[in-house]
């Protein structure tokens, strides 16, 4: 029964940072064959080394991506080769900290299960490549940064220490039971802790790590006196002291880390005011700070802080114009404040046990994605981007609630909310709004802070999406157009495709088939007709062909908008006369 429960969990689990399925079969030729054992072994080495270089994880061989249990039908000697990959220096060096076993399903299908732990060493493949697990992929890692990564990994040893006097009886059984439910029905809480290396055997007894006691201990403050969150609401925009002390509210949130974040969100949320002065559709929400942005800043502060610094805790300071979230300890290499400010997708866990546990609990998703999304959410709300500072060895994240643009600009930008645009593209649109809806390549470079190549790439994307066009052939002066609109001249079927065309900047045959519910030949005929009529422009060849905005569509769309505006003015004039 335990085996069946494990297999069911592997079938249902979502592949990502901590889990991957691999097929042992080759279907490339149209026939189902065994994959070559050597090729499969290389794939196993890549995934396990990437996971060990990141935060650990599980790999199951013999299950397809759709969850079908296909098994490992290889002969016994090949199976032994696969099982030995983690310790085989012909595939990975140094050997991986990995637990391996065979599992046989009720249908007599053999599966291979690998449980690799986070490792303080950096593991290289036989060809000297270094991989790092980032979300569901194994990404190459710069060899020049391997030494920094090694040094950073040793910081992760602190959460794995065994506090004197720590026992299994110190856990909150209710928290453990709820956590076990997240892992899979029927698995004991102790089994879950052992599987994640939150408890380990020492001298014949199971003892808890510091991470386990902070996550699930009944009294986490016994093990770390500053593991909670301090909140201060200051009146005004500056911190004062003495007779002018301007603290409006102050409290400390203390709880096991497994529930600390939820309690912090509930306690701080009432202090997040609504932005009543702005009501246009440009905003996802009316709060003065996007929910994801301020909560992600707190999650990162708790998860990635340096717990070896015992005299400082996580602090959240709220002023009239900003929130400051402070976390003890600078990020471990290769993560830097400069990289975070540049929205780079970088990740290195100082506390991999805590990271993995809180990911299972749903507080974190794809690692390395949170900070870039914070930037996106602040930009969507029309606010300044997050700021990252080093305040004497403490990371401070600042979120400002002041809009970057005035209300008129925000209302104009809201017209582009259905178009997939980057924050930089929105900034140049705001610039164009203040300059007769025009901008140049030089303007783009100066406003965004990029070179001519970056400007050219972004501007071409705006042209493909139909919101900008060159003033004349060969000109680097560009005119901004409002999003496409359908009028009586635009073919009805094409009008139905405009949302996709506007969002992505192109249409494919498959888009026509999906939206219009027609056959592929019919979709091809429609696209050809629209190209001949200059509604669309064909780009690419054969299987890479896409269809972009045509000159006639842009011209007709602008004419429709002008007519609608004129009709609106006429109606308003008639109303005034009457």
Image (cartoon, grey):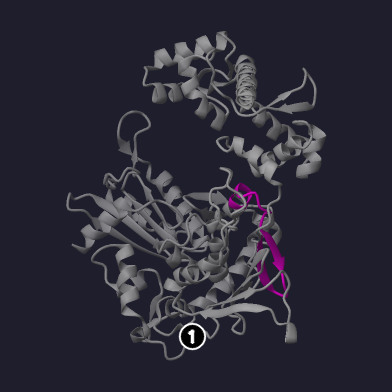
Task: Report the side of 471 relative to 287 (left or right).
Answer: right
**Residue at screen point 53% across, 75% down:** 157
Question: Which of the pair 353/153 is nearer the observer?
Answer: 353
Q: Quadrant of residue 504?
A: top right
Q: Quadrant of residue 192?
A: bottom left
Q: Is residue 393 magenta?
A: yes
What segment is highlighted magenta in the picture?
A: 377-399
Image quarter where the C terminus lies is top right
The residue labelled by disc 1 is 221
Residue 333 in picture, x, y percent from top left:
65, 64
**Residue at screen point 26% across, 46% down:** 69
Task: Report the side of 442 relative to 416 (left or right).
Answer: right
**Residue at screen point 57% across, 54% down:** 130
Res 134 visible: yes
**Residue at screen point 78% across, 18% down:** 472
Residue 47 in picture, x, y percent from top left:
46, 53
Question: Which of the pair 100/139 is nearer the observer?
Answer: 139
Q: Quadrant of residue 8?
A: bottom left
Q: Is residue 156 magenta?
A: no
């Amino acid at each position: 029964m335990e085996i069946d429960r494990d297999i069911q969990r592997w079938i249902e689990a979502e592949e990502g940072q901590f889990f991957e399925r691999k097929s042992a079969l080759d279907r490339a030729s149209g026939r189902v064959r065994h994959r070559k054992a050597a090729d499969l072994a290389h794939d196993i080495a890549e995934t396990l080394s990437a996971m060990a270089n990141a935060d650990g994880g599980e790999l199951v061989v013999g299950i397809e991506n759709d969850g079908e249990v296909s098994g490992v039908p290889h002969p016994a000697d090949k199976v032994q080769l696969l099982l030995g990959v983690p310790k085989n220096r012909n595939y990975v060096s140094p050997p991986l900290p990995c637990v391996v076993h065979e599992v046989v399903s009720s249908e007599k299908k053999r599966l291979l299960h690998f449980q690799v732990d986070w490792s303080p060493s950096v593991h290289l493949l036989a060809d000297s490549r270094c991989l790092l697990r980032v979300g569901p992929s194994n990404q190459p890692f710069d060899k020049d940064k391997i030494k920094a990564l090694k040094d950073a990994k040793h910081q992760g040893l602190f959460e794995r220490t065994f506090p004197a006097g720590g026992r299994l009886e110190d856990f909150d059984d209710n928290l453990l039971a709820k956590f076990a439910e997240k892992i899979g029905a029927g698995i004991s809480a102790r089994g879950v802790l052992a599987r994640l290396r939150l408890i380990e055997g020492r001298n014949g007894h199971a003892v808890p790590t510091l991470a386990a006691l902070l996550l699930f201990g009944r009294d986490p403050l016994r093990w770390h006196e500053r593991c909670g969150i301090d909140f201060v609401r200051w009146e005004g925009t500056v911190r004062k002291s003495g007779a002018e002390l301007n603290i409006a509210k102050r409290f400390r949130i203390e709880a096991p880390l497994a529930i600390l974040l939820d309690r912090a969100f509930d306690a701080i949320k009432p202090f997040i005011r609504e932005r009543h002065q702005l009501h246009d559709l440009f905003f996802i929400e009316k709060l003065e700070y996007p929910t994801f942005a301020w909560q992600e800043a707190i999650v990162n502060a708790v998860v990635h802080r340096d717990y070896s610094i015992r005299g400082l805790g996580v602090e959240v300071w709220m002023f009239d114009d900003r929130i400051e979230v402070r976390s003890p300890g600078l990020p471990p290499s290769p993560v830097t404040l400069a990289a975070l400010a540049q929205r780079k997708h970088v990740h290195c866990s100082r506390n991999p046990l805590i990271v993995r546990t809180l990911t299972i609990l749903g507080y974190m998703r794809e690692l390395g994605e949170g900070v870039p999304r914070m930037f996106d959410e602040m930009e969507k709300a029309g606010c300044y981007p997050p700021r990252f500072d080093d305040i004497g060895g403490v990371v401070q994240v600042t979120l400002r609630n002041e809009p970057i643009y005035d209300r008129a600009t925000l209302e104009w930008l809201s017209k582009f909310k259905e178009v997939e645009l980057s924050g930089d593209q929105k900034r140049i649109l705001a610039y164009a709004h203040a300059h007769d809806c025009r901008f140049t390549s030089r303007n783009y470079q100066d406003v965004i802070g990029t070179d001519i190549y970056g400007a050219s790439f972004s501007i071409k994307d705006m042209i493909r999406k139909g919101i900008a066009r060159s003033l004349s052939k060969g000109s680097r002066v560009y005119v901004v157009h409002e999003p496409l609109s359908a009028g009586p001249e635009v073919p009805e079927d094409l009008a139905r495709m405009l949302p996709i065309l506007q969002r992505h900047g192109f249409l494919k045959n498959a888009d026509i088939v999906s939206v219009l519910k027609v056959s592929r030949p019919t979709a091809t005929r429609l696209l050809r007709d629209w190209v001949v009529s200059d509604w669309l422009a064909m780009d690419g060849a054969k299987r890479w062909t896409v269809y972009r905005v045509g000159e006639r569509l842009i011209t007709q769309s602008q004419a429709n908008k002008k007519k609608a505006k004129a009709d609106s003015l006429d109606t308003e004039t008639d109303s005034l006369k009457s």
